[in-house]
Amino acid sequence: MNTLKGVRGSLFTKIFHEDSPYFRVFKNRPTFFIDRHFKHFDVILNFLRNGGCLPLMVLPRDLRLLNEMRVEAKFYELGGLVTTIDARLARLLDVARF
C-alpha cells in the first residue's frame, strides 16, 4: 500500500480512508474498488514505484496508447505522469514533422 500512497496529491492518497467512496468492507476485510480497466495500470504502478518519475523512453511510441495512458494518469491525479506522457507525445510529434 505504501507504493500506492507514495505520490502526494494522487487519487491513491485520497482513497485509503474509511470515508472514501472507494472503501468497502468485504468478508470483514477492508477492500478498495476502482472501476477502471487494468490495461495501463502497469505504467501507473511503475511510475509510483519509481517515486513519481518515469523515463520518457519506457513509454510506447504509439500515439493512441499514450493518449489512453494520459487519460488514466489524469483519472488517478498523477500530474507528473501526465507531464511525462505529454513530453513523450511532443517528442514523437516533433520527430513526425521531419
Image (cartoon, rainbow, N blue to C red):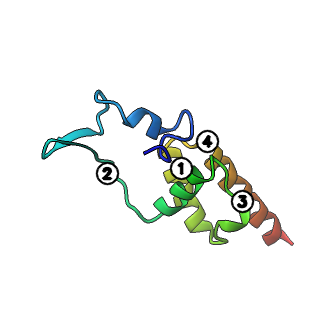
Q: Describe the element under mark 1 as helix, strand or loop.
A: helix
When the figure is inspected, residue 52 is found, relative to residue 16, above or below; the finding is: below
Q: Quadrant of residue 15?
A: top left
Label 2, label 1: how far apart the Cα atoms are: 14 Å
Which amino acid, by three-letter code, is at mark 3? Answer: Pro
Tell me how many marks there are.
4
How many neighbours does mark 1 have within 10 angstroms: few (below 14), some (14-19), or many (20 or more)?
many
What residue did someone put label 1 on? 73
Q: Residue at x 75, y 58 (%)?
A: 90
Choose the circle earlier in sequence order: 1 or 3: 3
How many neighbours does mark 3 have within 10 angstroms: few (below 14), some (14-19), or many (20 or more)?
few
Q: Quadrant of the C terminus?
A: bottom right
Label 3, label 4: how far apart the Cα atoms are: 15 Å
Which amino acid, by three-letter code, is at mark 1? Answer: Ala
Q: Describe the element under mark 3 as helix, strand or loop.
A: loop
Q: Residue furthest top?
A: 19
Label 2, label 3: how far apart the Cα atoms are: 27 Å
What residue did someone put label 4 on? 79
Residue 39 or 68: which is nearer the viewer? 39
Choose the circle earlier in sequence order: 2 or 1: 2
What residue did someone put label 3 on? 55
Q: Residue at x 78, y 62 (%)?
A: 91
Q: Residue at x 30, y 39 (%)?
A: 22
Q: Describe the element under mark 2 as helix, strand or loop.
A: loop
Which amino acid, by three-letter code, is at mark 2? Answer: Asp
Q: Residue at x 68, y 47 (%)?
A: 83
**Residue 33, percent across and down?**
29, 47
How many neighbours does mark 2 have within 10 angstroms: few (below 14), some (14-19), or many (20 or more)?
few
